[in-house]
Image (cartoon, rainbow, N blue to C red):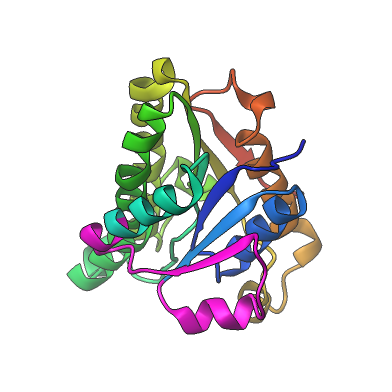
């Protein structure tokens, strides 16, 4: 499963999952557009120069900036073959009635709006190119409401519903839109936050990246609108 001469956009590339996804596609021969909010984050996570890593610092909450940045990617590299909308965030702790508007907005911005802006910026080009792949990141927890996680579950549920909607709208244009739904991902932050848990039960970022890679491959041409649980042993 190679991606030679393919251009893959990874948002949230400086995060733990983003780094794993970027490395997976790079190893498969792709040109990887590394998107994150700050150049410093990208330089720290991806030091040095590599012709198949292209660092792109852009605020995904600024729709005009995202459109301009992705238009430049298409101009420089002949198009975008796949979008991995990895950028997102997590917040929990309050009951629904105690959750402040700022935290509702935070979850919507980080998980929904970043994905929407990226999709808006790549889909017209994919339609013109008669094909493309989009993978979003939902959450296995968002299959139902979880106490203390209302804002997070609501935002990830919206990601999942929008994925299904976009899939139905774009499948006849040879654009596959699918979603992965991880449980707890084995990251340093999660290990620190849950020191008594067994991380061997969690999902390794590289394993989740492998599923995303498959969904962006020609082998997944017949897969549309799937919400794929990736839950390790949990």
Number of residue marks: 0
In the figure, residue 151 lies in which quadrant?
bottom left
Magenta-tinted stretch: 37-66
Residue 188 vs 170, above or below: the answer is below
Residue 105 pos. (x, y %): 23, 64
Residue 144 pos. (x, y %): 44, 42
Determine the residue positioned at 50% across, 49% down: 77
Describe residue 115's horizontal placement relative to residue 230 as left or right: left
* Of residues 75 and 138, the one drawn nearer to the viewer in this rendering: 75
Is 39 contained in the magenta span?
Answer: yes
Residue 182 vs 161, above or below: the answer is below
Residue 118 vs 93, above or below: the answer is above
Determine the residue positioned at 40% across, 49% down: 75
Describe residue 190's horizontal placement relative to residue 11 as left or right: right
Is 25 contained in the magenta span?
Answer: no
* Of residues 131 and 119, the one drawn nearer to the viewer in this rendering: 131
Determine the residue positioned at 44% across, 66% down: 90
Residue 89 pos. (x, y %): 43, 65
Residue projecting furthest to the right: 200
Q: Say if residue 165 shows up in the picture.
A: yes
Q: Say if residue 164 shows up in the picture.
A: no
Residue projecting furthest to the left: 101
In the figure, residue 14 lies in which quadrant?
bottom right
Describe residue 109's horizontal placement relative to residue 3 as left or right: left
């Amino acid at each position: 499963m190679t991606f030679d001469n393919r251009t893959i956009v990874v948002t949230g590339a400086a995060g733990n999952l983003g780094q794993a996804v970027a490395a997976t596609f790079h190893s498969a021969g792709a040109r990887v557009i590394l998107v994150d909010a700050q150049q410093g984050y990208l330089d720290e996570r991806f030091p040095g120069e590599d012709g198949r890593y292209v660092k792109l610092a852009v605020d995904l909450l600024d729709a005009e900036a995202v459109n301009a940045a992705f238009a430049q990617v298409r101009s420089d590299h002949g198009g975008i073959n796949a979008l991995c909308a990895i950028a997102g965030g997590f917040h929990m702790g309050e009951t629904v009635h105690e959750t402040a508007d700022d935290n509702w907005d935070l979850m919507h911005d980080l998980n929904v709006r970043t994905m929407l802006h990226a999709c808006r910026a790549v889909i017209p080009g994919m339609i013109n190119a008669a094909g493309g792949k989009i993978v979003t990141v939902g959450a296995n927890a968002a299959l139902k409401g979880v106490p203390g996680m209302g804002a997070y579950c609501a935002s990830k549920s919206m990601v999942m519903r929008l994925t299904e909607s976009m899939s139905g709208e774009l499948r006849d244009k040879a654009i596959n839109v699918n979603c992965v739904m991880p449980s707890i991902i084995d990251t340093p932050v999660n290990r620190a936050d849950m020191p008594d848990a067994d991380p061997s039960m969690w999902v390794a970022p590289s394993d989740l990246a492998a599923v995303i890679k498959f969904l962006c491959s020609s082998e997944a041409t017949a897969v549309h609108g799937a919400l794929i649980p990736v839950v390790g042993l949990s």
